[in-house]
Image (cartoon, helix red, strand yellow):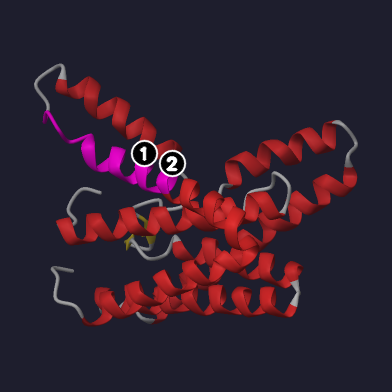
């Protein structure tokens, strides 16, 4: 998160919260399979293969493949709009919003598999919002790296490094956890129709990133 303005730090935290929210909805719907946390899914895939649980392994493997396709879609949009960072971010967010909208409409129609596909693609695409030199600069849907950064920055502070440089990474992790808590509660009340909340938040972020003043 080094080199980004405070406004973009805040955007990253909100997007991590959005990822946590959607991931909680997907996790509950799929009975323990993630739509944004592919490290966990990779372990589940391995266990499924080892235990010859081929149906479960096939489901998890399919979700992982869809997530990668979402990353590709987000990367293509980012490359096509890379001439301007504001345009790039808002374009990727528009893609995420469109996919979440497809998922929300699919829930209304009772097409839950299509909703899960759209959610997974959206989570993959979201990772292209923050990029430098064609690479992800802030991970939004997985937090292992953020937790490692927290530990590393705290250790560095013991030896004269910046005292509070770990706080942005803690905020990112807390954003994802908080979003997941909200997603679980929303699912309890609304079921998968809670995906409309995520769609509305994503749409608001798309408009805000495109038109509100901030240092890009």
Q: Residue at x 40, y 51 (%)?
A: 139
From the top left corner, tell me how far across and down residue 149 is, in percent.
31, 34
| Residue 66 found in image quarter | bottom right
Q: CA distance from mark 2 to mark 1?
A: 5 Å
Residue 115, visible in the rendered structure: yes
| Residue 153 found in image quarter | top left
Q: Which mark is residue 1?
A: none
| Residue 39 found in image quarter | top right
Q: Is residue 30 left or right of residue 211?
A: right
From the top left corner, tell me how far across and down residue 47 is, in percent.
77, 33
From the top left corner, tell me how far across and down residue 148 is, in percent.
37, 31
Q: Which mark is residue 143?
A: 2
SS of the residue under disc 2: loop
Q: Give the labeled residue for mark 1.
A: 146
The segment highlighted magenta reads: 162-178
Q: Residue at x 16, y 17 (%)?
A: 158
SS of the residue under disc 1: helix
Disc 2 crowd rating (10 Å Cα; few below 14, some 14-19, many 20+) is some
Residues 179 and 66: in front is 179
Q: Is residue 190 left or right of residue 125?
A: right
Q: Residue at x 31, y 25 (%)?
A: 151
Q: Majority secondary structure of the magenta segment?
A: helix
From the top left corner, tell me how far across and down residue 85 is, in percent.
26, 73
Q: Is residue 200 left or right of residue 155?
A: right
| Residue 174 lies within the magenta run | yes
Q: Are marks 2 and 1 in contact (CB under 8 Å)?
A: yes
Does 177 sit above or below residue 119?
A: above
């Amino acid at each position: 998160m080094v080199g980004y303005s405070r406004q973009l730090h805040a955007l990253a935290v909100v997007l991590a919260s959005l990822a946590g929210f959607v991931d909680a909805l997907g996790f509950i719907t799929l009975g323990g399979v993630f739509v944004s946390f592919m490290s966990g899914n990779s372990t589940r895939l391995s266990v499924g293969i080892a235990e010859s649980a081929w149906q479960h392994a096939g489901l998890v493997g399919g979700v992982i493949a869809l997530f990668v396709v979402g990353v590709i879609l987000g990367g293509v949009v980012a490359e096509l709009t890379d001439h301007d960072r504001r345009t790039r971010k808002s374009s990727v967010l528009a893609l995420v919003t469109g996919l979440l909208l497809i998922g929300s409409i699919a829930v209304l129609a009772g097409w839950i598999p299509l909703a899960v596909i759209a959610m997974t693609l959206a989570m993959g695409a979201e990772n292209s919002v923050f990029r430098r030199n064609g690479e992800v600069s802030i991970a939004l849907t997985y937090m292992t790296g953020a937790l490692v950064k927290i530990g590393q920055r705290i250790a560095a502070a013991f030896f004269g490094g910046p005292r509070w440089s770990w706080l942005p990474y803690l905020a990112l992790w807390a954003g994802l956890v908080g979003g997941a808590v909200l997603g679980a509660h929303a699912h309890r009340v609304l079921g998968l129709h809670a995906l409309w909340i995520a769609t509305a938040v994503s749409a608001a972020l798309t408009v805000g990133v495109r038109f509100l003043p901030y240092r890009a």
